[in-house]
Amino acid sequence: MATRTPETPDATGTLPGAPDAGREVVFRARGLRKIYRMGEVEVAALREVDLDIGRGEFIVLLGPSGSGKSTLLNILGGLDTPTAGEVAYCDHRLDGAGEAELTRFRREHVGFVFQFYNLIPSLTVRENVQLVADIAEAPMAVDEALALVDLTARRDHFPAQLSGGEQQRVAIARAIVKRPAVLLCDEPTGALDYDTGKRVLETIERINRELGTTAVVITHNAAIAGMADRVIRLGDGRIQRIDANAHKLRPSQLSW
């Protein structure tokens, strides 16, 4: 694993620890800051973050609670906006964008997976996924999305009839049915046991590998870093270092 410490971009704008030269940069952040104000108290969630993410990369964000991981993910996904700095998806500037523009960005380009599944209990697996397909411009077939997460046989079951891992895989199918270019995952295995968590990671890895979807995964579990193209370690709102894996592990090879 090669380690690089973040520095100022060179004259060409390239960052140390940047994605491989052959990858198109899809996310570009420069001087990213996020300040939360609670009364008279200011809390800096992000401090001068510079980052490039390449198309089709599998990125793991590591760091303790309060390090800025979720804030960074939310800004990349258009769920939040920075206090200062620039962030763009391809040629679309996200900093300063209005809510309507960010909503369109999320709808057209981003799939989200969170620690808690947020499925509608009164709808079947297929119906939960169909909800997103109905508002997408060019969705894949719902049954195709379910096949990608190995849930074809459970398509007519309700969430209460599924295990936690199965529910999380429904959430992944719901996220990918609109064919997003980017899959953003916030602690997707946090509520799951060891074996179930690995199954969910296998699903995310498959989406990244077979569809070329850029995947960014937040985790507290350092073992998951082995399956990433690059591991971005945050602390105190800053990128502390970036590690590049010369040889990625499959989820079945991980242990913790």
Image (cartoon, grey):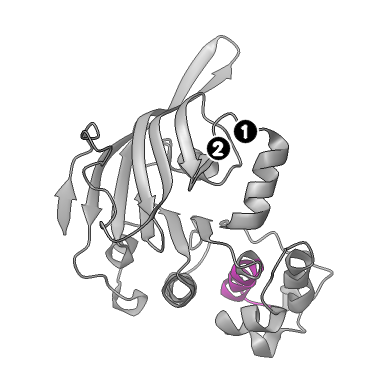
Tag 2: amino acid:
Leu
Q: Residue at x 29, y 56 (%)?
A: 230
Furthest-top residue in this view? 40
Left or right position of 232 against 86: left
* Residue placed most toward the observer, 9 or 188: 9
Residue 3 in view (yes/no)? yes
The residue closer to the viewer here, 29 or 3, is: 29
Disc 2 secondary structure class? loop
Mark-to-mark CA distance, 1 and 2 = 5 Å
Q: Are marks 1 and 2 in contact (CB under 8 Å)?
A: yes
- The residue shown at (26%, 41%) is 14
In this picture, residue 38 sits left or right of residue 217: right
Magenta residues span 162-174
Give the residue pinned by disc 2. 94
Closer to us: 195 or 171: 171
> Where the N terminus falls, by quadrant?
bottom left
Q: How many marks?
A: 2
- Pointer 1 residue: 97
Q: Position of residue 217 (x, y in %)?
A: 44, 56
Q: Quadrant of residue 99?
A: top right
Vertical side of 113 occupied by 39: above or below: above
Magenta portion: prevailing SS class = helix
